[in-house]
Amino acid sequence: MPELTPNEKLVANALEIIADDAKSANLLFVAHGAGLAGCFSLIKSQPPYYPGIGLVINLFAFGFIFACFAAFMLAIARSSFLMERILNGRPEAKRPVLIATGCLLGSFALLIAAVLFIAVRSIFL
């Protein structure tokens, strides 16, 4: 197998990082979707009064939106990275990756907040 040039190594590493971030976005997407499904099934099966369920639904919904936006920005980052590589020979896709990373962190923080809120509410109720 031929040795990769430094530029090819850079491209391979960058695409690997983008792929790992996309996997993270998909996992957060699924986790928030499962949380929303659980909240809606709880509302459907329980009496209408369940204190704090609106906050939990909002946390899961905003996390879901952040995860969707992160996945979208990572798709843009990958395509712009590859297009810059093809057209100019020097790939740069920093801005979409930074935005997607922020969305991933926000989505993860909202997931942790929702889980902690549910845990605290179940202990004290």
Image (cartoon, rainbow, N blue to C red):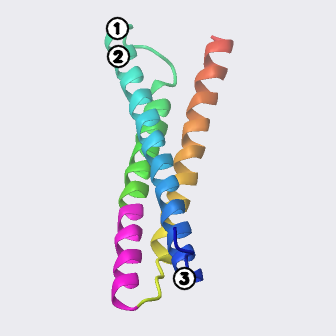
Q: In this view, does 34 lie to the left or right of 1?
A: left
Q: How far apart are marks 2 and 3 (CA)?
A: 51 Å
Residue 3 vertical position relative to residue 73 in the rendered view, above or below: below
Residue at the disc numbered 1: 45
Q: Is residue 49 magenta?
A: no
Q: How far apart are marks 1 and 3 (CA)?
A: 57 Å
- Pointers 2 and 1 in contact (C-beta within 8 Å): yes
- Percent from the top left, x then y, of residue 26? 42, 44
Say few, some or many: other residues with alpha carbon within 10 Å of mark 2 (under 14 / 14 to 19 / 20 or more).
Answer: few
Say few, some or many: other residues with alpha carbon within 10 Å of mark 1 (under 14 / 14 to 19 / 20 or more).
Answer: few
Residue 77 vertical position relative to residue 62 in the rendered view, above or below: below
Specify start and end residues of the magenta stretch as a single range. Answer: 73-88
Instruction: Identify the amino acid type marked 2.
Output: Ser
Q: In this view, does 79 lie to the left or right of 52?
A: left
Mark 3: which secondary structure? helix
- The residue depicted at 59 percent of the width and 81 percent of the height is 6
Q: Does the magenta stretch include residue 74?
A: yes
Residue 76 vertical position relative to residue 47 in the rendered view, above or below: below
